[in-house]
Amino acid sequence: MPHLVPLLIRGINNLSDARYCAGMGADKLTFILDPALPGHLDTKAVKELAGWIAGVELIGEFDQLSAHEINAISAECNLDAVLLRTPRTDEELAEIAPPVYLELAIDSISFAQPLPTSPVGFLLELPTAETPETIKALQNISAQKPLWLGPGLHPDRARMLATSLPLAGLVFPSGNEVKPGLRDFDQLEAVFEALEIE
């Protein structure tokens, strides 16, 4: 089922989410692999989850781990890319072997601030409402760099952004199982449906 833009689902931590999102046409799934971050998974769990899905890009989320540690975990989990939650110097970025996505803070975006050139894309989680200034800044960034926006689980807002900005894609959070094998997908399903190409 094709969507208006590619979709990235963050923080996969269970098999229900992994299989559902891959089956619904998500393009990228992230796993939190940095032990300093809440909800992190060990490499064994990520490899087990990855063994059940196909056709999606697998991305590891990291914060403060060194490039050497990121490279080792990425190789062990056979990741396609990494998502860094905090900025790094150009020298540090050059030491990271997989392609890098970099998360930006909403209060850090401006017309004047130069963005690093090495990341393959930038990710930005939006606040609950966009100001005209924010939209202008997003237009500026997305015209120059691949930009992935996280609008929250709001179907109408997601569709509006997908059709009004030149985005690389949209980002949505995964969730937690009620108990093993039991998960409510109503919110994610509404987003997937809103973004289907009619």
Image (cartoon, helix red, strand yellow):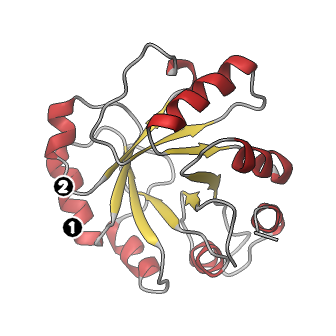
- The answer to whether mark 2 and mark 1 are in CB contact below 8 A is yes
Residue drawn at x 64%, y 23% as measured from the top left: 136
Residue drawn at x 60%, y 61% as measured from the top left: 7
Does 124 sit left or right of 72 as displayed? right
Does 83 sit left or right of 169 as displayed? left
The image quadrant where one finds the C terminus is: bottom right
In the rendering, at what x and y percent does residue 64 appear? 30, 38
The answer to which of 137 and 20 lies nearer the viewer is 137
- Measure how far apart labels 2 and 1 are at the Cα level: 9 Å
Task: Check disc 1 and give the amino acid type.
Answer: Ala
In the rendering, at what x and y percent does residue 185 appear? 78, 69
Mark 1, Cα crowd under 10 Å, few <14 / some 14-19 / many 20+, is few
State the residue position of label 1. Answer: 75
- Which of the 4 image quadrants contains residue 8? bottom right
In the rendering, at what x and y percent does residue 3 appear? 69, 67
| 74 to 78, vertically: above or below | above
Q: Is residue 183 visible?
A: yes
Residue drawn at x 54%, y 51% as measured from the top left: 168
The answer to which of 48 and 89 lies nearer the viewer is 89
Task: Check disc 2 and give the amino acid type.
Answer: Ala
Label at residue 33: none
- Which of the 4 image quadrants contains residue 16? bottom right
Q: Nearer the viewer, mark 2 or mark 1?
A: 2
State the residue position of label 2. Answer: 97
